[in-house]
Structures are given as C-alpha cells and as structure tokens.
Amino acid sequence: MTASFAAVDLGASSGRVMVGRVGPDSLDLTEAHRFRNRPVRVPEGLRWDILALYAGVLDGLRAAGQVNSVGIDSWAVDYGLLDADGALLGNPVHYRDARTEGVAEQVWASVPAADLYAATGLQYAPFNTLYQLTAARSSAQLASAERLLLIPDLLAYWLTGEAGTELTNASTTQLIDPRTRDWSYDLAAKLGIDLKLFAPLRSPGDPAGLLRPEVLEETGLTGPVPVTAVGSHDTASAVAAVPATGEHFAYICTGTWSLAGLELDAPVLTEASRAANFTNELGLDGTVRYLRNIMGLWLLQECLREWGEPDLTALLREAAEVTPLRSLVDAGDAAFLAPGRMPARIADACRESGRPVPGSPAEVTRCILDSLALAHRRAITEAQSLADHPVDVVHIVGGGARNALLCQLTADACGLPVVAGPAEAAALGNVLVQARAHGLVGDRTSMRRLLARTQQLRRYEPTGDAGVWRAAEDRLLSRR
C-alpha cells in the first residue's frame, strides 16, 4: 500500500508544499509548489504577510492533487491573535521586529533568569513568545484577543475551523514545562500571561480536523481530507528526519538558522546549561531537542541580497580558495539578528575584534562559513559535556546539507564524520509523522531506517589538524 501526504513547510524566506509518497519500503518527495515568504515593514514594524502565505498554501494543495492527509510545519515563536468571532487581529509580528528590545530585563525583574530556565529549560532569545507577549501587554490587539494561535496552528485553523496548539512548537514559547510536557501555570501566573488564550495542546500524530468544504472547493480536492498534527516546529520535523542508524549522534538543522544539538530522553536544566544558553525543546515521542540556536546561513543570505544575488556555486568555489580561519565572527551574536548591511556589519565585527577585515565577497563568505563551522563545533562539544552524551557522528540536515564547503568545514572543526542530507528534512519529517498516524511506518527507529535507505546522503570525513580549530575557537572567545 502506498499513500500520499502533503507537507506544508514554511521557512523564513520561502514556503513550499511537498508531496510525500510512502510505501512499505519507499519514500519519495516531490515539490508541488514553492512561494516566497516576504515580510513587510509597515509603520508599526516588521510583519509577516500571513494572507499571502495562506494563499500559497491553497495554491500548493491545488497543485498537490489528491492526498491522504495534510500536515503543516513552520518557524517557531510567532503567532496570530483572533477576536471572539475567530477573525485575525492584524498581521502577525515578525520575530526580528524590534519590539522586544529590553523586554527580557522586565521579565527577569519578576522571574529571575535562572528561575525562568529552571521552569522551562528554554534558552534566552529576545524573540521568545513569552517576551513578545510581555511587549504586547498594553496593546489594543492583545486586549481584544480571545485566542492566540502559533503560525502553523493558525493556518490549520483556517483550513479546518478547529483550533489547537501543537506541543513541539508550544515548547518554544517559554511557557511549557519540559518535564511535564504541559503549560508552566505558575510561571504564567507570575508574569500575568493568560494561558486561556491558547487552544488545547495536541501532539504530533493527533488529528487536527478536516479540510473545510470551502477549502475543498478552492483546491479541487475530494473530501474528506484530514489535517494531521505533525512536529509543527520545523526543527522538530527536521530532527525526526535525521537518518541516524544509532543513538550517539549530533544533528545540525541548517537553513536560516543553525540548530545544533542532541536528541535526549530528558531535559538538562542545570545552571551550567543555562549559562551555555542551551535550550530544551520538545520533540517526537517524548524526546527533548537539546540544542543551541546559531545565526546560521542567514548571514550569507543577507550578504547575497546586498550583493545582488551573485552565482552561489561560483562564490563558494572562490571561498574555498581563501585562507582559512583568517577572519572570524561570533555566529551566535545577536548583533546579526536584524536584516540589512550584513557585509558591513561583519566587517565591523572583525575590525572591533582586531581580526583582518574581509574585503571581497569570497572573503566574507569564507569568514561566515568558518565562523559557522566553529559555532557548530562549540555547540556540539558543549552539548556532549553538559548532557553527558557522547556522539560519534554529526548529521547535517536542511538546506545547508547542499553546501559542501560548510559540511566539510564542520567535519574538520568537530573532528567527526558528517553525514549530509536530506536537504528537505523538515518536509520529510512532516510526511513521516502523517504516514505513521495512518499506520504506514513504525517507530522513530523505523522512520530513520527508511530515510537512510531511500534518501541521498553524503559523508564527509574530517581532514587537517583539529588543534587548529581549537586554537581559533580560543582566540575568538578571548576577544568577545
């Protein structure tokens, strides 16, 4: 038996609807429709064009043809507010909007940072939903809201008319207790956050409703077509699609962000973990995604935009010839969070730290990739120590798996083999959770074996002297 599943996979710069066909020993993924995700700056700030995204989803479902189920994943933390009639109260705020500047200090005045971490296990990031809600506390929109839906849940609501809050994405709000896998009610009460705004929690694999008749008509699909909750945080879906053959692996989900870490059975809530800014987000089947957020290929994406979108293949070929580890920046620095002037800001960071300033696009590109590889090394090394969980291989999944130079530099920096692929990990994880809910695949181990058998993977062995990377890391950290 073979069945087809539509994976709606929304990233920070583009959205896509992919169709996965799953059989007893087959897994094929094709792209039905791809569309831009272009945030819009309006007088009140940076906003997501959620209506354009929803239109892209409908176009994608029409192009996908008849499917057995639909699943939705997207980036985390952002949300839409609905009024008592279920109508959207304005475009969702973009996590790169400046409204949360200085808000963390307000929160910590009520709940110290150490207590916040002990309750939620979430890393400090200025855009976490908790800080966004604090920033919006006096807004007319929040005062009028009857319901808050995270981005994939909002789109599922428009498709089905049923509201829910998927757990893996809810865990990024900084309002979930990773030990109980439920809301942290005491924390919310201390901060004056009304958890009644959130729809009931649901887990990956749970039913999320049926496509409404109006959606069936617009897409040309024949009902009933169920929507299935998946790991709706795209990283949760991507980690579910890591084609690991053992337990001792690290992963790096690469794209706009690099999410580097481990899959664990329990959270790590120590003070040392908080000081290292690791996060405990929830994954499939009771697992914890223990990871660190790194700025990721956003740095290169922004540079390419400034340079007028030059040929990336040629640029990477030139970057491979640049002197390694000459110019470095801290790829986790929040100074790189906002859009705009990225080449100049990278040059400024090098200048301020006393490092050679990269001049050409190839030199800037090599600076970015060396810096990312170092950040990957540091995250994976520290995660192993803090979680007491050694690894013998690193899996790179997501768009960065196509970047051979980044994959090789990461293997060299970590001193571990890197297995790159699949590039469409989030969509594949999305599809596999749907297929499992429909009885076509088994547990996570079975899912990963199927991925390892059916997906194109490439292995990179470490080369060179790992001590050179250790020394570069030491120099970088000493100048922070």
Image (cartoon, rainbow, N blue to C red):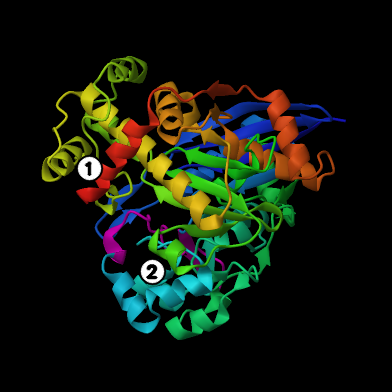
Position of the N terminus, as image quadrant, is: top right
Q: Quadrant of residue 110?
A: bottom left
Q: Residue furthest right?
A: 1
In x, y percent, where is residue 153? 59, 57
Q: Is residue 313 magenta?
A: no
Q: CA distance from mark 2 to mark 1?
A: 23 Å
In x, y percent, where is residue 327? 21, 33
Front-lying residue, 451 or 228? 451
- Checking the image for residue 340, the label placed there is 1
Secondary element at image label 1: loop
Question: Is residue 269 toward the left or the right of residue 6 in the image?
Answer: left
Q: Mark 2: few, some, or many residues within 10 Å (few <14, many ≥20)?
A: many
Secondary element at image label 2: helix
Q: Mark 1: few, some, or many residues within 10 Å (few <14, many ≥20)?
A: few
Mark closer to the chain start, 2 or 1:
2
Range shown magenta:
78-100
Residue at horizontal 29 percent and vertical 20 percent from the top: 319
Residue at horizontal 50 percent and vertical 73 percent from the top: 118
Front-lying residue, 100 or 416? 416
The residue wearing badge 2 is 131
Q: Label 2 is placed on what type of residue?
A: Tyr
Q: Label 1 is placed on what type of residue?
A: Gly
Residue at horizontal 37 percent and vertical 42 percent from the top: 375
Q: Considering only vertical position in the picture, is 281 above or below 37? A: below
Q: Quadrant of residue 22?
A: top right
**Can see residue 284?**
yes
